[in-house]
Amino acid sequence: MRLFDRESWAEVAQSLRRHRVRTLLTAFGVAWGMFMLVVMLAFGRGLQAGVLGTLGDYTANSVWIWPGRTNLAHAGHGPGRRVSIDIEDLEPLSRLEGLVALSPRTDPPRPDRRITARRGSHHGSFRLSGEDFDLIRMRPLALDEGRLLNPRDIAKQRKVAALGAQVHEQLFDDHESAVGETIEVSGIEFTIIGVYHARQRGGEEQQDSTIIIPWTTLAHSFGPRDRVGSVALLAEPGSNPELLANEARRLLARRHQVHPDDDMAYEMWSSYRDTRRFLDLFRAIEVLIWIVGGFTLFAGAMGVGNVTLISVRERTREIGVRKALGATTGAIVTQVVLEAMTLTLIAGYLGMVVGVGLIDVVGGLLAAMPADQRPAGLAPPVVDPMTAGLGLAVLCVVGLVASAMPAKAAAAVEPALALQTE
């Protein structure tokens, strides 16, 4: 119950004030260790978010498959044959186990996939992409106004379009609303239903200069009508989308008489592999930060232990008098541990507060910067409350370890010999 004893806390304060310079220097070592741990972890998380953001605006559990050329002879067909993904392939693909959504995509037959769009006196050359209504789940986009595609647009082959931010900027005047207006794309009029921009920096320039229309409309108006350019598969959360993609490739290989070991016929891409690689890397970095920060805290706490041990030796006569007057060994040990833990926790808490304050200032500055001016691969650092709490818990353990030696020295004092100490 010494935690609630006013005299015990008065004694702790007196002991810490007795050598102010020594106490402040020791406290600085502990505070610095806690400050470095919090700051390094926060900037590590900011770096992780920034690097993962540069991978592009694709969800980690999605994968893209597109047709290429065969590399192996099979079923009477020689290598080098160009294969396709037909519209008839979409229904069996949609029945794959573990598939959440399937999104076909078509492109104009032109090699550069660019078209000319006009609105009055404004015109420009842009990318045209035929997408499905599930596009938003595969590649999250941010809407500036209006909406993106819906199932009725796809089913009815509507001549509607969503403009990327750069397209809107070139075809419309500043602050002019585009929704409900019409543009002419290769001689065909499309009604604008929305304006969007890429939420992440990975594919921002290419995506923002794209006009999105229903894939069924693009196939019907520009051809070819019987096949799609690629399909995007969305796997169940937490699963490996590449396993789902391999199943889809095997299904397509069977339907198009492709050798089952021919990996070049149907190619695939997913951010999953890069994402997992970076996550493993940053997990290792976080472990390293905890090791370095833990040793820094331990070094600071050892300084507390050394200072407390010196204090115990300076107070040998005082401890001897206490024991001679009836103070128990437990009371002496508790008082020494209380002094060491108080210095450790106060210093650690101050270091954490300063670290959090610095992170808030830096995070605010980074968040206020335009995305194109922000340092590449660095997002605003974030302090995880659980991490801060864990840091304080580690500090408590280190403080107990640091106070063990001084407490043992205090408990070993013999009253008779202590009273003879000068």
Image (cartoon, grey):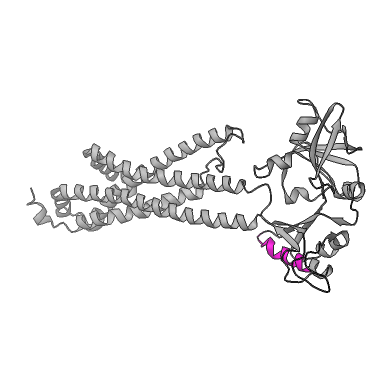
Residue 130 makes an appearance in the image = yes
User: Picture coordinates of residue 124 (x, y %)?
Assistant: 80, 33
User: Picture coordinates of residue 145 (x, y %)?
Assistant: 78, 35
Q: Nearer the viewer, residue 253 or 356?
A: 253
**Residue 211 in the image: above or below residue 242:** above
**Residue 388 in the image: above or below residue 96:** above
Q: Residue 8 colored magenta?
A: no
**Residue 352 in the image: above or below residue 409:** above
Residue 146 makes an appearance in the image = no
Q: Nearer the viewer, residue 115 or 6?
A: 115
User: Picture coordinates of residue 41 (x, y %)?
Assistant: 47, 47
Residue at 50% x, 35% y: name it.
362
Residue 352 appears in which quarter of the rendering?
A: top left
Residue 217 falls left or right of residue 138:
right
Tally of marks: 0
Q: Is most of the magenta stretch helix, strand or loop?
A: helix
User: Picture coordinates of residue 277 (x, y %)?
Assistant: 57, 57
Residue 75 appears in which quarter of the rendering?
A: bottom right
Q: Magenta region: which residues?
A: 237-250
Residue at 18% x, 55% y: name it.
326
